[in-house]
Every structure is written in structure tokens, then in C-alpha cells.
Image: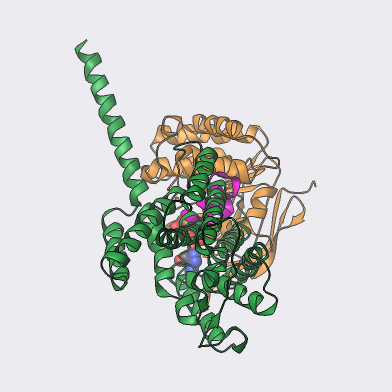
């Protein structure tokens, strides 16, 4: 087997006495489309926080492209190629939408580029995501839906090898979901691995090649979308007894 | 914000400042010196407070340590000022770096309180340090200088050069890669980290530059007053002005503290002579409350709003014209 892009080994995370993640292992292949699902509070965002470095896990390891990144700062992981969006949007609210994208374009980039070049690249990403007409608006004043798009666009601007989208589609209309899915497929075709966290089941089932299901901080299932749909444990987790 | 070409304007300001020392009387250099001192402090405060989003209540501590660096050097070897000023910058830059390292994990009000505590600790140390005069204080005897009309004129010109240098540095930071990273930190530190911004390193650069600049503002103070003791060196008005001037001018760009310092500083010098120096803190307080409540973006923010409004009006008018045509 070739080396996975992301390899999470027996990761645990506690908040005080509460176990948010209990020895969860998962791996994502190079250029793979990976779904991470689970009921509310099952630990999906916590997992993303540990992978991106926003939280430090107490035990377990995170390997990225074979390198142990468990103790690296978030900005170091971003530079290595892990980019994430935030479920609750966190725009740089004093900046315009375009300037928001210029931050990762300037700071996460492997080599330095000129301002005009960064603005061009930012514009191209905004066009892809459907925010180009708001490029010069203040990001603090965007609607929730546009903020989610901005989250995704800013993560893309880090030019990652692994893009993690944490519920970027919540609240979007059916056609908008399709649009964003298209964009993610396009990005994936260029070789970017994608972890999609989503409550919009239709989207995550259509998008993912492989899915892991979390429930109460533990991994309860792993497989193709078909296998997941037909897994009785998953049904129980979502619908209760 | 680029209003006019910066360097020609700075050079002109300096030349006029030097020329003015031969035409105006002593009082104006003393007042001018104090305004410039406030300007450097405000510019320094704003690098951490305005650009980075960390409120520092301990400005007087950095200022006083700059002054005490001078006192120590004067007492030991009495070196020329071109040695004293960089020495104060280094001492206070390191102090800023250390303070940043210890306190930057705190956010919001906790950081502010930590900086205030640091200033109090430093003051206590100085009160108990006999070498620099302890609570009683220390005298500095200044020597005559050639070329300048008086020693105060000389200090005024030095301060003018330092102020221009400080503003130039703040302006550079404002528009540089570092400045953009600091703005991201101010807006959202976690999001900044995840966008690749090395937040700790940038914050430490920010506290170091701030400390060094405040140290420079304090370095000449002993020569200016010729007698330094802890209470006046760690003065409340220095710390309050360093916050009030940027707030009144506007904290988001380098221009704000300059405008705020020139305005508030001049008002303070005027009232000192014409009414009473006791009134100064009251004036700062009232202005600060007024601006925080009514114009939190300061004068620069008001100007930007006004510019946007006139642009809108013009476009509307143009729209009406084309509609009727
Ligand atoms: N910083 C924190 N401190 C304390 N508890 C936390 C923290 N972050 C998350 N939790 C708890 O950990 C559990 C998992 O939260 P998490 O946000 O990872 O869930 P999730 O799967 O992303 O849920 P959702 O689908 O609602 O986004 C929840 O019970 C949550 O309350
Ligand atoms: Mg979540």
C-alpha cells in the first residue's frame, strides 16, 4: 500500500472529564474524497481541530505525508498542505473578501509572490466559488451563507494537498449545494484530497469515495457510501433505538 | 491611507522644525517636545493595540525604563545621546519581547491587566534601586551644545527626527507583509494561524517594536526635565495619552495616532498654559469617552465615512444625470 496522505492513529481528546474522541484512527489517501459524518456532538469538528492543530490531542498521532505533525502549530501544518474551513465562520472581518483570501495566499504559499499576482489568484478562487461580485465587500457584513463560501474559498487559497470542509453547505439551497459540490470535484480532479463533513447526506454520499462515521467520539463504521447506508449501526446512531 | 508623498512631507517637516528653533522662543520647543513625545508613544502603542489588537495599559513602564536606561548610562559613563537612544531602544525592545513572551497567551482584559501589573512591578524596582536615586530621584546635568539656540531646541530637533523615524516605521509595518499578518491576528487569531500566519512570532515582533519605540520616547526625558524620579517617570498621563491619542485619531492605520497626538497634545499644552495643568487628565478622559462612544474608529474613521458618503452622493448625482439625459 502506498503511504496515505493523512494518517490519524488512535487519537484521543478530552475536555475535562468528557471524552470527545476516543482512540479514533482514520486515513485519507492522496487525492481521495473522504466523508466524515456523525450525529451532532459526535466529535467531527473536534477531529478537524486536532488534525489542523487548533487543538492539541492528548494521545495518538497525526501523520501528514508521512511526517509526524502531532506537535506542530496550525500555521506549520497549513504550510505543509492542510487547510480547513470553520463550521462557525471566522472571517477577517476588517478586511474585504479579496483581502481575506490574500492572507493564506501570502502566508501559506511555498514561495513569495507579488501583490498583484496574489489578487489575481484570489479573484480566480472567488470566481470558482461564486463570490467574485462580492470581492470588494467587507467580509464582516456578508450573509451567513456567503461567509460559509468565504470559509471554503479561504481554505482553497492556502493551496492545500488536503482540504477539510466543515459543514460548508449548511443552509445552502439545493442548486447551491450542487454548485459547491462541482467546485470540490474540480479541485479534487487537480489532485487535492478532500475531507467533507456534512449533514446534507445527499451531498456527502454523492461526493465521498469512502466514509467514516463517528458517534459519541468513537468510530462506529467505515466504508463506501453504499456500505454506510446499509449499516444498521449507523442507522441506530442517527435514528436512536 | 496615502494622503501625500510621505518622504517629501517628512523631510519638509524636519527642515521647518529645525528652522523654527531659530525664530520661536523656548516655550514652543518645550511644548513641541512634549507633543512629539506623545506622538511617539501613541505610534508605538498603536502597533500592538491598533494593528495587532492587544491593549497595553503599561506604556508608562516602557517609557520609564527608557528614561532609566539613560539615567544608568549617565551615572555610569555619561555617553553621548547617539549612544543613549539606541541603548534605550535595545533595553526596552528586550523588555517588550520578554513581556510579550510571558503575557501574550492572555487575551483581552487579562493581557491589559498583566501589562499594568508589569509597569507597577518596574516602578517598585526603580523606587528601591539606590543607583538611580531610588524614590528621591536623580539629577542630570546637561552640557551646552553648538549650533542650536538652546539645549531644549536641540532636544526638540532630536525628538522630531525620532518621531519621523517612528512614524515611518509604523507606516512601513502597516503596509508590509507583517502588517497584513498582524491585521489577521487582530481580526481572528485562530483563523490567522490556520491561514498560515505564524501568530506568536508576529506578536513578539509587535511587542518588541512597541517596547523599543516607547523606550526611545523615554530616553531623552531625563535630559529634558534634568531630574528623574519614579512617580513622574511612570506617570499616569503618559500611559493614558498613549491609549487616548490613537483612539481619538483612529487605530486601524499609522495616520490615526499622528492626528490624535497632534490634536490632543496641542490641546493639552494649550490648557496647561492658559487654564491649568490639572485639567489635562480631565480633558483626555472626556475626549476619550466621547470618541469611544460616538466615533470608535476615530477621526480617520470619520474621514473615511465622509469620503464614502461624498462619493456616494456624487455617483447618485451622476446616476440622476444619465437618467434624465
Ligand atoms: N472547546 C471545547 N470545550 C469543551 N467541550 C467541547 C469543546 N469543543 C467541543 N466540545 C464538546 O465535544 C463534543 C463534540 O463536539 P464537536 O463540535 O466535535 O461535534 P460535531 O460532531 O462537530 O457536532 P456538530 O455536527 O454539531 O458540528 C460536544 O459534546 C461538544 O460539546
Ligand atoms: Mg461540528
Q: Nearer the viewer, residue A143 or A64?
A: A143
Percent x, y of residue B59:
48, 69
Which residue is drawn at the image coordinates 58% and 40% (left, top)? A157
Q: How far across and down, in percent of the image, does residue A29 sit? A: 70, 45
As displayed, is residue B6 above or below residue B226? above
Q: In this view, which residue lies farthest toward the right? A: A1
State left or right for residue B17 relative to residue B212: left
- The stretch in magenta equals B175-195
Where does the image place residue A88, in percent across and percent down from the top left?
44, 53
Q: Nearer the viewer, residue B213 or B314?
A: B213
Quadrant position of the C terminus of chain A in the picture: bottom left
Does residue B319 appear anywhere in the picture?
Answer: yes
Res. A43 visible in picture: no
Q: Is residue B283 left or right of residue B123?
A: left
Give the residue furthest to the left: B324
Rendering colour (chain B): green
Does residue B251 sit above or below A96 in this rendering? below
Q: Residue furthest top?
A: B325
Indicate whether B289 appears above or below A190: below
Q: Residue at x 52, y 58 (%)?
A: B149
B211 or B139, which lies in front?
B139
Q: Which chain is orange?
A: A
Type of secondary structure dominating the magenta stretch: helix
Of residues B294 and B156, the one nearer the viewer is B156
Specify whether B260 is left or right of B176: left
Amino acid at each position: 500500500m502506498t503511504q496515505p496522505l493523512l494518517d490519524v492513529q488512535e487519537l484521543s481528546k478530552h475536555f475535562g472529564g468528557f471524552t470527545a474522541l476516543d482512540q479514533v484512527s482514520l486515513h485519507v489517501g492522496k487525492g481521495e474524497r473522504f466523508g466524515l459524518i456523525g450525529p451532532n456532538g459526535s466529535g467531527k469538528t473536534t477531529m478537524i481541530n486536532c488534525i489542523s492543530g487548533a487543538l492539541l490531542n492528548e494521545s495518538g498521532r497525526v501523520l501528514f505525508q508521512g511526517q509526524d505533525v502531532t506537535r506542530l502549530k496550525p500555521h506549520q501544518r497549513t504550510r505543509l498542505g492542510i487547510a480547513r474551513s470553520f463550521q462557525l465562520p471566522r472571517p477577517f472581518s476588517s478586511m474585504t473578501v479579496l483581502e481575506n483570501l490574500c492572507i493564506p495566499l501570502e502566508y501559506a504559499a511555498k514561495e513569495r509572490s507579488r501583490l498583484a499576482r496574489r489578487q489575481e489568484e484570489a479573484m480566480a478562487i472567488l470566481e470558482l466559488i461564486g463570490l467574485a461580485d462580492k470581492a470588494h465587500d467587507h467580509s464582516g457584513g456578508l450573509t451567513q451563507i456567503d461567509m460559509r463560501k468565504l470559509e471554503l474559498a479561504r481554505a482553497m487559497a492556502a493551496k492545500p494537498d488536503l482540504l477539510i470542509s466543515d459543514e460548508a453547505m449548511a443552509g445552502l439551497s439545493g442548486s447551491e449545494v450542487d454548485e459547491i459540490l462541482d467546485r470540490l470535484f474540480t479541485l479534487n480532479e487537480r489532485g487535492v484530497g478532500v475531507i467533507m463533513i456534512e449533514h446534507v447526506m445527499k451531498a456527502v454520499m454523492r461526493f465521498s469515495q469512502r466514509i467514516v462515521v463517528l458517534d459519541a467520539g468513537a468510530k462506529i463504521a467505515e466504508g463506501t457510501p453504499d456500505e454506510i447506508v446499509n449499516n444498521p449501526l449507523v442507522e441506530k446512531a442517527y435514528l436512536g433505538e | 491611507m496615502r494622503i501625500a508623498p510621505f518622504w517629501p512631507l517628512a523631510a519638509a517637516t524636519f527642515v521647518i522644525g529645525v528652522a523654527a528653533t531659530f525664530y520661536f522662543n523656548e516655550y514652543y520647543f518645550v511644548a513641541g517636545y512634549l507633543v512629539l513625545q506623545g506622538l511617539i508613544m501613541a505610534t508605538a502603542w498603536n502597533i500592538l493595540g491598533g494593528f495587532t489588537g492587544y491593549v497595553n495599559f503599561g506604556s508608562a513602564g516602557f517609557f520609564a525604563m527608557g528614561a532609566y536606561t539613560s539615567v544608568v548610562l549617565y551615572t555610569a559613563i555619561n555617553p553621548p545621546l547617539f549612544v543613549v537612544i539606541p541603548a534605550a531602544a535595545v533595553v526596552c525592545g528586550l523588555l517588550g519581547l520578554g513581556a510579550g513572551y510571558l503575557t501574550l497567551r492572555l487575551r483581552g482584559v487579562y493581557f491589559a491587566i498583566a501589562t499594568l501589573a508589569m509597569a507597577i512591578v518596574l516602578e517598585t524596582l526603580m523606587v528601591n534601586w539606590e543607583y538611580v536615586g531610588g524614590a528621591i530621584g536623580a539629577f542630570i546635568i546637561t552640557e551646552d551644545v553648538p549650533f542650536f539656540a538652546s539645549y531644549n531646541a536641540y532636544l526638540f530637533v532630536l525628538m522630531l527626527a525620532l518621531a519621523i523615524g517612528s512614524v515611518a516605521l509604523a507606516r512601513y509595518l502597516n503596509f508590509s507583509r507583517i502588517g497584513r499578518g498582524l491585521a489577521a491576528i487582530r481580526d481572528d487569531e485562530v483563523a490567522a494561524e490556520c491561514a498560515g500566519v505564524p501568530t506568536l512570532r508576529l506578536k513578539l515582533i509587535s511587542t518588541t517594536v512597541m517596547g523599543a519605540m516607547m523606550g526611545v520616547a523615554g530616553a531623552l526625558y531625563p535630559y529634558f526635565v534634568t531630574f528623574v524620579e519614579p512617580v513622574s517617570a511612570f506617570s499616569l498621563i503618559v500611559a493614558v495619552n498613549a491609549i487616548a491619542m490613537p483612539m481619538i485619531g483612529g487605530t486601524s492605520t499609522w495616520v490615526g495616532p499622528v492626528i490624535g497626538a497632534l490634536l490632543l497634545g496641542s490641546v493639552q499644552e494649550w490648557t496647561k498654559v492658559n487654564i491649568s495643568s490639572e485639567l489635562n487628565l480631565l480633558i483626555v478622559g472626556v475626549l476619550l469617552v466621547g470618541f469611544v462612544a460616538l466615533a470608535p474608529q476615530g477621526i480617520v474613521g470619520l474621514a473615511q465615512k465622509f469620503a464614502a458618503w461624498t462619493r456616494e452622493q456624487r455617483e447618485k448625482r451622476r446616476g440622476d444625470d444619465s437618467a434624465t439625459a
